[in-house]
Amino acid sequence: MSDATPPSLYASREPIFPKRVSGTFRNLKWIIMIITLGIYYVTPWIRWDRGPQLPDQAVLVDLANRRFFFFWIEIWPHEFYFVAGLLIMAGLGLFLFTSALGRVWCGYACPQTVWTDLFMAVERWIEGDRNARLRLHRQKKLDFRKVRLRVTKWTAWFLIGLATGGAWVFYFADAPTLLSDLVTGQAHPVAYTTMLILTATTFFFGGFAREQICIYACPWPRIQAAMMDEDTLVVGYRHWRGEPRGTGKNRDGLGDCIDCNACVNVCPVGIDIRDGQQLECITCALCIDACDEMMEKVGKPRGLIDYLAISDEPREIEGNEPRPVWRHILRPRTIMYTALWSLVGIGLIFALFIRPDIEMTVAAVRNPTFVTLSDGSIRNTYDVRLLNKHGEDRPFRLTMTGHDQLHIELEGTPYESVNVPANETLLQRVYVIAPPNSEPVQSHRTDFRFWVEDLTNGDRAYKDSHFNGKGP
């Protein structure tokens, strides 16, 4: 038997140090990063005047009062279908973009990608470009310079993570007030705990895990294949033009690829796109910028690496032009996703505009089903819940229709109206009474309708119910 150590089934991670690159897609990534991070960090500080007794924050998840504010829109717990609809639209949008352009979401707008790009930019700014970072990584001696650079980089990463965690908690409370409480140590422990967790995860995911999250933790690389087909535009390498690759001035019999590895050196996940489509590829297109720059230097046409569709490969091999981009984007699959996305969006907008400002629910008390009063009248009891969505107290009047011999009484008040506090729900017990020997008493069931009217502006809402009598 041999004493040789068997080879390991697992390879340790090789750190990736992408090289700086400039070009169309890199500039697009910078623009998207600035916009998305700007929205994330700035949004909690946007003020929005909603009147008295309501928060002045434009976007706020008010867990204490179970409401979600988004500029002029206010979502209540029973209206969670709006949130569900937005999530469905987000899913359909992801399917649409993946079907048309592959993992374009992963390459440009995914939070993991955006924050990793930011962390890499900070790392490059502090430690230098690819070669300088490689030398620092391979340096075994821990001298003052290496410690200084590492500490400076980690401090910057920590501050970014802290700002990320801080911005998140500001979405759940009034931002200026919470900031003051955080600085003075008066904030709730949940706020500090949440910030600590998000700071740590941002620091680790963006600074160390990076592409490992995309490759191993994220399920989307395994799902994306179901969304793509031969007409999907993905980042690819034109083998028929680039092969056989080689270096040197004498290029007789060689393709356009000079095997400079520029595309590999700029890849944030460390793959070689010339090996074909791979699970790790996030379609960031930085390899296109790197290759185009190199092609210009050697006097070759751009586009050796480009957004390609499998269905266009035979056409290009024969020397024909690929089909226009719109032919790849406008096809039955993408049209279907667009139609579904639009239908959900139109439905949400329609539901948003037709929803009432006052709402009511009615729950009949069935234990007992009815009560016989001393004069022979029959009384049914109902719990009516009134919701006032306005930012001020409103008087609501309760009435009923459906049978002339039925009348209502409100517990605790001789009047037909009650005052409902601003942005709150009021539970009011209501009695419906039928006189002795009346038709509702002699019947097992009499249908009627509860009405609630806002006496301030005349808005009305109703709920149908029924009265239980003794029967014949």
Image: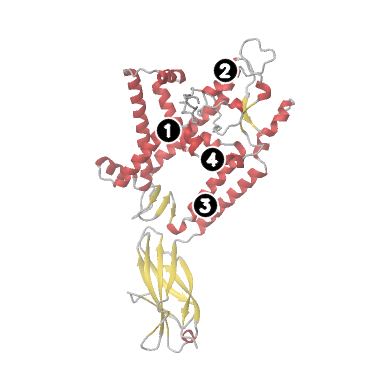
Amino acid residing under circle 4: Trp
Label whose residue precedes the other's in the sequence (4 or 1): 1
Q: Mark 3 to mark 4: distance in Å?
A: 21 Å
Q: Which circle, 2 or 3, is nearer the viewer?
A: 2
Task: Name the residue: 43% across, 49% down.
Answer: 70
Q: Secondary structure at mark 4?
A: helix
Give the quadrant of residue 238.
Answer: top right
The residue that label 4 is drawn on is 220
The mark found on residue 206 in the picture is 1
Label whose residue precedes the other's in the sequence (3 or 4): 3
Q: Mark 2 to mark 3: distance in Å?
A: 48 Å
The residue sitting at the right extreme is 318
Q: Residues within 10 Å of mark 1 (few under 14, many from 20)?
A: many
Label whose residue precedes the other's in the sequence (2 or 1): 1
Q: Residues within 10 Å of mark 3 (few under 14, many from 20)?
A: some
Amino acid residing under circle 1: Gly
User: What number of labels is visible?
Assistant: 4
Q: Secondary structure at mark 2?
A: loop
> Does residue 311 appear left or right of residue 146 in this picture?
right
> Does residue 142 appear left or right of residue 467 in this picture?
left
Task: Name the residue: 36% across, 37% down.
Answer: 199
Which x, y percent locates residue 133?
Answer: 43, 20
Which x, y percent locates residue 370?
Answer: 42, 81
The residue that label 2 is drawn on is 260
Label whose residue precedes the other's in the sequence (3 or 1): 3
Amino acid residing under circle 3: Gly
Q: Secondary structure at mark 3?
A: helix
Label whose residue precedes the other's in the sequence (2 or 3): 3
Relative to 450, does residue 206 appear above or below in the rendering?
Answer: above
The residue that label 3 is drawn on is 85
